[in-house]
Image (cartoon, rainbow, N blue to C red):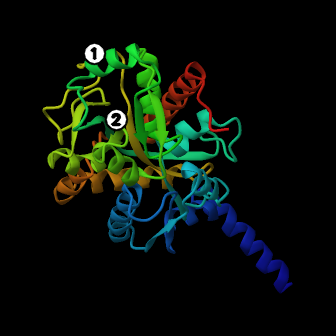
Amino acid sequence: MLRRHLLHWASSALAVTTVLGFSPSVQAQEAWPNKPIKLVVPFAAGGTSDILGRLLSDKLRLVLGQNVIVDNRAGAGGVIGADVVAKSAPDGYTLLLGTIASHAINPALRTKTPYDPLKDFAPVILLGSIPNVLLVGTDQPYKSVKELIAAAKAKPDTIGFATSGQGSSQHMSGELFKLLAGADLAHVPYKGSAPAIQDVIGHQVPTSFETVTVALPHIQGGKVRALAVTSAQRSSALPNVPTMQEAGVPGFDVSSWQALYAPAGTPAAIVQRLNQEVEKILAQPELKPRLEALAMIHQPNTPAQFADFNRQELAKWGRVAREGKVSLE
């Protein structure tokens, strides 16, 4: 008798809460977060992604009331860390600081990746983009992009460009330059930005594509010359340096972007809240100098807008890979 009474009470309570919109799953979402959140950064500590990830984790901790723990899972151009998140529970407690490498370039250059960059993730927000810059060593005669193009056409595949490695946005900036300018430069990949730019400074390699973040102190110190930034608009960090389009390469637009993702299937309410909280964080006046130090440009965006952007980037780099016959395999 008691058992029947308890079962009747439980089923009645469940019916009432469901009718009123307070199902257990909805209650769980409304309670989010009630434990620490892991933010996977798919690159090593100390880089741009790591710096941005730790900045975000500190700010999110304050607004969400839970610790946000940065977990560095470096390797394979961001693929290893991204795969960890793709296979995580879609409950809002595992997030990814993804990039152009993990969600556009690597999937475009590899015949097989362990995840689908579109289907396996819930896009949260595009955090910002950082332009690359075309550099030349101070020993080089090129004073403009047009002069470099002329030299490369005169002697194809003899002028090297250093980058932080295969599949990086710097590498693909060079590949797009080759396609759009018809200038056949030779790629010289390094294991990171530091050794690449040091060899340009040391006159071992004549040119380089590098992020403005990394290149800026060397440009300001007169150790390298900046010929053009790769974004469609000039960088506020280098206002006197023309864009690649202004320098004579129409249609050139490349930026190394950073973004926040959750696993596919994460409740829309959680994704939306994260989007809104991060927008508020990025709008804080005290963050402006820190973002400027990273040379990062942010424009407000919704999860749907970011999803559209990601699809466009994946298609763009797929075309570059096919037309330029670029592969990581």
| Residue at x-position 18% and y-position 31% | 241
Q: Please say if 294 is above or below 68.
A: above
Residue 251 locus on image (x, y percent):
36, 17
> Which residue is labeled 2 in the image?
207
Q: Is residue 193 visible?
A: yes
Viewer-proximal residue, 109 or 40?
Answer: 109
Q: Secondary structure at mark 1?
A: loop
Q: Which mark is residue 116?
A: none
Viewer-proximal residue, 255 or 175?
Answer: 175
The C terminus lies in quadrant = top right
> Which residue is labeled 1 in the image?
248
| Residue at x-position 37% and y-position 39% | 205
The N terminus lies in quadrant = bottom right
Q: Please say if 135 is above or below 218.
A: above
- Measured in 3D between alpha carbons, the distance from the residue under mark 2 to the one under mark 1, in whole angstroms, is 18 Å
Q: Earlier in the sequence, mark 2 or mark 1?
A: 2
Residue 169 locus on image (x, y percent):
44, 39
> Could you tell me if the residues under marks 2 and 1 are in contact, i.e. CB atoms within 8 Å?
no
How many neighbours does mark 1 have within 10 angstroms: few (below 14), some (14-19), or many (20 or more)?
some
Image-based side of 210 in relation to 142, left or right: right
* Mark 2 residue type: Thr
Q: Please say if 172 is above or below 43.
A: above
* Mark 1 residue type: Gly
